[in-house]
Amino acid sequence: MRGVDGQPVPVVVPGRNLGYGAGANRGVAALGDEELVLVCNPDLVVAPHAVERLSAALDAHGETAAVGPTVREADGRRYPSARRF
């Protein structure tokens, strides 16, 4: 399998359903030392420049380890997905 940049992407087969979070963690761990990783659902629609803006937010705040976008409902209303860690 290849990523959007054409580079090989490892396929992880854990042997059972680990659940979304554990599966995402296992997949990210298999990537090694990638600087940035985008974890998302398969039905995601990415707004133009969204990934660049998320990356810029990380760059602007060196102490930040994770960022997330504003999530919108189909009718444009903001979905209450933001959480503090």
Image (cartoon, helix red, strand yellow):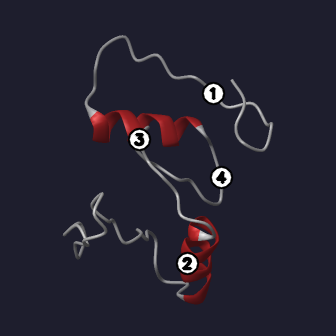
Secondary structure at badge 4 equals loop
Disc number for residue 10: 1
Q: To which residue does mark 4 refer? A: 34
In the image, what residue type sits under mark 2? Leu
Numbered disc in front, either 3 or 4 = 3
Instruction: State if disc 1 and disc 3 touch (CB < 8 Å).
Output: no
Instruction: State if disc 1 and disc 4 touch (CB < 8 Å).
Output: no
Residue at horizontal 51 percent and vertical 40 percent from the top: 29
Q: Which one is earlier in the sequence, the residue at label 4 or at label 1?
A: 1
Q: Which one is earlier in the sequence, the residue at label 4 or at label 2?
A: 4
Disc number for residue 43: 3
CA–CA distance between discs 4 and 2? 14 Å
Q: Quadrant of the C terminus?
A: bottom left
Secondary structure at badge 1 equals loop
Numbered disc in front, either 3 or 1 = 3
- Coordinates of residue 71 in the picture (x, y in percent): 33, 65
Horizontally, residue 30 falls left or right of residue 74, namely right
CA–CA distance between discs 4 and 1? 13 Å
In the image, what residue type sits under mark 3? Asp
In the image, what residue type sits under mark 1? Pro
Q: Which one is earlier in the sequence, the residue at label 2 or at label 1?
A: 1
Q: To which residue does mark 2 refer? A: 58
Numbered disc in front, either 4 or 2 = 2
